[in-house]
């Protein structure tokens, strides 16, 4: 149970990276090309099943 002085056994960090690697690389290089309408790709965000399910342990506070 939770009480004063409670310490979690293991720390975890979850994040969703929504950045576009191509744009970041172009900014680093310093050359940004204008996309041609025919070459524009439709990028859809994705999420894994592991991120949706989460972690369920007896020590997890809910």
Image: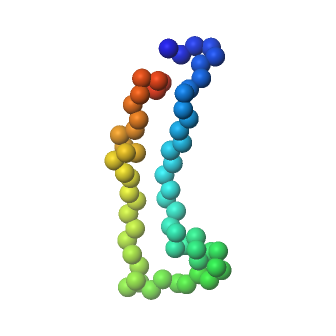
Camera-nearest residue between 14 and 38:
14
Q: Vertical placement of 25 versus 5: above or below?
A: below
Looking at the image, what colour scheme do you see? rainbow
Q: How many marks?
A: 0
Q: Quadrant of residue 11?
A: top right
Split into 4 quadrants, where in the image is the C terminus?
top left
Where residue 51 appears, x then y in whole percent?
A: 40, 45
What residue appears at the point 54 percent right and 32 percent down from the top-left corner? 10
x then y, percent, for residue 36: 45, 86
Percent position of residue 46, x then y: 38, 57
| Relative horizontal placement of residue 5, taking residue 1 as reference (left or right) | right
In the image, residue 57 above or below residue 19: above
Place residue 41 in its image quadrant.
bottom left
Q: x, y (%) of residue 13?
A: 54, 42
Is 61 placed above or below 47 here?
Answer: above
Q: Is residue 46 left or right of residue 7?
A: left
Image point (38%, 53%), residue name: 47
11 or 19, which is in the foreground?
11
Which residue is at the front of the view, 35 or 9? 9
Q: Residue at x 49, y 59 (%)?
A: 18
Taking the spot 37% from the left edge, 51% from the top edge, the residue there is: 48
């Amino acid at each position: 149970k939770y009480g004063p002085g409670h310490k979690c056994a293991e720390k975890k960090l979850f994040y969703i990276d929504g950045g576009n690697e191509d744009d970041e690389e172009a900014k680093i290089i310093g050359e940004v090309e204008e996309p041609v309408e025919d070459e524009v790709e439709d990028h859809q965000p994705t999420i894994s099943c592991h991120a949706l399910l989460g972690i369920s342990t007896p020590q997890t506070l809910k």
